[in-house]
Image: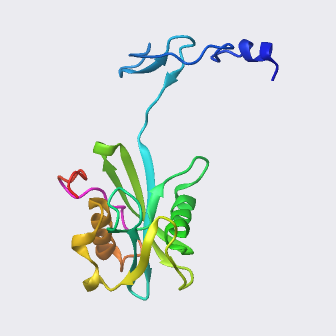
Amino acid sequence: MAQDEFTSIPGQLGPGMGPHFVRRVPDGDTVERDVCGHCGHISYANPKIVVGSVVTHENRILLCRRAIEPRKNYWTLPAGYLEEHESPEQGARREALEEACADISLDLLLAVYSIPRISQVQLMYRARLASPEFAAGPESLEVRLFDWDDIPWTEIAFPSARWALGHYRQSRDQTAFTPFANPPGETGNAR
């Protein structure tokens, strides 16, 4: 794009004019936000969407021991941030592939959790291994299948992973159900 084309685009900055954000309530809004003093662009900071799944194989549950912070060395479900232009289902399958080198088949949406402290909305699915192969991906130290009674409950990384495991247990024999939400009074603040 030619230089003169760049300066003629509404909402774009001219040459040499970097963004200059100020905190204020934009016209027609009710929340203070970062607004560029040059062009009026509003920078919206919105919650992140996390997608993941409770993956099973022969009545055992797949868990990943985290190789990264936060909660390095603790066990969790394969989950992570949804990418742009990706459906939640695609994201859940990608996260299982990245963290556990696992090809999974999704069943149903298990739960929608809200973690306001860290501005997250989490979509968790029920899933099964499409094939029995799995291995630790770059974000996992190890990946294992656990019988319910052998799950290392004191080493589970996040409250929402515990919730999802419990909600899976409640719904495992159901072919249809309303997706679960945070347990009453739970906001994800405790580890």
Point out the stretch of residues depicted in magenta: 177-184
Q: Which residue lies furthest to the bottom in this view?
A: 58
Location of residue 33 in the rendering, given as x and y in whole percent from the top left corner: 40, 22
Tell me where residue 68 sits by quadrant. bottom left
Scheme of colours in the image: rainbow
Which quadrant is home to the C terminus? bottom left
Location of residue 142 in the rendering, given as x and y in whole percent from the top left corner: 43, 76
Residue at 37% across, 57% down = 69
Q: Does the magenta stretch include residue 35?
A: no
Tell me where residue 57 sits by quadrant. bottom left
Q: Residue furthest right?
A: 2
Location of residue 174 in the rendering, given as x and y in whole percent from the top left corner: 37, 76
- Drawn side of residue 50 relative to residue 41, left or right: left
Residue closer to the observer: 48 or 111? 48
Residue closer to the observer: 90 or 8? 8
Q: Can you say whether 86 is above or below 28 in the image?
A: below
Residue at 44% across, 49% down = 49
